Image (cartoon, rainbow, N blue to C red):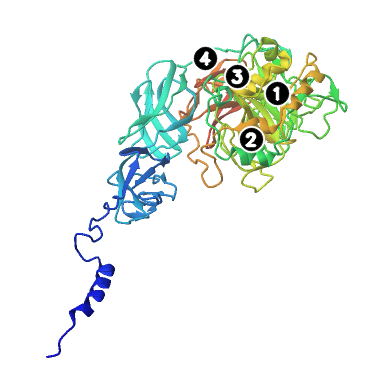
Amino acid sequence: MRRINLLLLIPALALLCTQFACGGTSGGSSKMGPPPPTVSVTVTPSPANVRLGTPQKFGATVTGTSNSSVTWEVNNIANGSASIGTIDASGNYTPPATLPNPNTVTITAVSAADSSVTGTSSVTLLNPVPALLSVMPTSFSTGAFAITLTGSSFVSGVQVSFAGSALTTNFVSATQLTATGNAPSAGTFAVSVTNPNPGSSASGSLNVQVTGNQPPPSACSGFTPGVQGSLNGFVPFPANNLWNQNISNAPVDPNSAALINFIGPSTPVHPDFGSGEYNGSNIGIPYVVVAAGQNFVNVDFTAYGDESDPGPMPIPANAPVEGDPNPGNGDRHALILDSANCWLYELYQAVPNGDGTWSAGSTAVWDLQNYNQRPLTWTSADAAGLPIFPGLARYDEVASGAINHALRFTLQNSRAAYVLPATHWAATSSNANAAPMGMRLRLKSTFDISSYSPTNQVILKALQQYGLIMADNGSSMYITGDNDSRWINDDLHNLGNVTAADFDVILMNPIYTQANVPTGPPPVINNFTASSQNVTAGTQVTLNWDSPTASYFIVTPQVGAVRGTSVVVAPAQSTTYTLIATNQFGRTTATVNITVQ
């Protein structure tokens, strides 16, 4: 055999030990480093309750890695789905439109560093909190009644309550309900809406008035008759009406900045009212208060008669018209307050005929005590379907130290949509950031009003507490008021230092368009009768009717707007009386003949 020289192998073995760390007393250390950290993900909040219609932000905390990114799942579906809710890359979860079965889902955050590592949150989905915006009619007689409720976030199984008692409730849609019940006594009663479990919750309440068999007494008897007569502290419509709601703490609309930007942030406020004349016409919109004994006259329609309340109306022959003494082809509004019966009559394109009667493009009647609901999508004397008078800046209110209602204003452009209390649109723009009719602005609470005059401070304080309601197309940021010799025009012009940028748009929900305007049946007139149908001239006759779903009534001829379920007439000749019953969905008529011998 060939001998191997061991001395020659020693250097080679040394080299191998150097490369492969052979053991030995003088070799390198054989200890291992610390184990790598464990990746974990924690989701917050966990668990969580989420109401439909209310997004929820989830967060994920990742430890054990410098990569803190995660992806999100709902019930193991990346980003979720419409039926169980969706979640975006930032963890913003939007619940589904309706409750799934079961009403629980799991939100999962998946580590981008290690997809096998997740964190979860168990979510219980609850029904939304309902919002009640209107109840119609707001006044009805004792006995059986039917009401229509408008709002948002209603769900199947919703319950309407009247004075704390459950009514028979019909779910029409997420924005509309109908209910029936029986009112045993007269008085003012609260109506509310409660969504069912899971997460049962109730809306705020609105008041309705049960009048018995007689209409309520006039609350307008303290008005001062005459042009620009003082209301002596009376504020039209109930305290919970949208015109009179203090919105100083209302949430801001998420699209507020874009809406203001579309108006033009530097657009100044302009008081479209004052004393005296401008270019030969009075500044502002005048009104007149009439007392008992004012003759009721007929109105001939020149434009929108099919969407108007017919006469007769207590219009003086010399009633002031917007733009007097040279109203020309302007809007020519005429506003008449009947202090004896507490009704407001408003005319657009009003023209006296010279024989005591009037012509008008359109007319609308408003119950100053109850705010009667006129049909949705019908115009009024205003493009928004609103009353004009309650939104005026009136000198008698400013002199008293407070304006306790929203003010009316105009914008150059509007889109085909409205938010309550508006009920009609007159679109001039298709831009999504153009205002819907009824859009409400609020002067920012941080706006310093201390440097303004006492008069202007009253107006600015009202804009911070009650805001502006978009009522018509016109010059942008023009605020409407009355014509009164006591206004100081130079002082009012200082309001021009306030611009659109000083306002927020308050939350608009729901916004109604042609796609979601509530629909329903017009009122049903169950009967319309006379206590006697054959009488001698001047004999008193009681007309009676039953129409529980009407918002208000007009009887022609001679009578005009009435409350309750009866009225007394004394025909001088044979007459056919017509009862016109109106609600938010339309109008129904019935007639009865009285023969005078």
Name the image quarter holding residue 231: top right
Q: Nearer the viewer, residue 88 or 8?
A: 8
User: To which residue does mark 1 refer?
Assistant: 335
Q: Which mark is residue 384?
A: 2
Q: Amino acid at mark 2?
A: Ala
Q: Secondary structure at mark 2?
A: loop
Amino acid residing under circle 4:
Pro
The residue drawn where x is 78% and y is 13% is: 486
Residue at position x 42%, y 21% in the image: 190
Instruction: Classify 107 as above or below 424.
Output: below
Residue 315 lies, in percent from the top left, at 72, 21
Q: Secondary structure at mark 1?
A: strand
Left or right of 133 on screen, residue 377: right
**Foreground: 186 or 50?**
50
Give coordinates of residue 90: x percent, y percent: 44, 47
| Mark 3, residue position | 236
Contact check, label 2 and label 3, Cβ < 8 Å: no
Q: Can residue 294 be seen in the rendering of this structure?
A: no
Q: Amino acid at mark 1?
A: Leu
Q: Residues within 10 Å of mark 1 (few under 14, many from 20)?
A: many
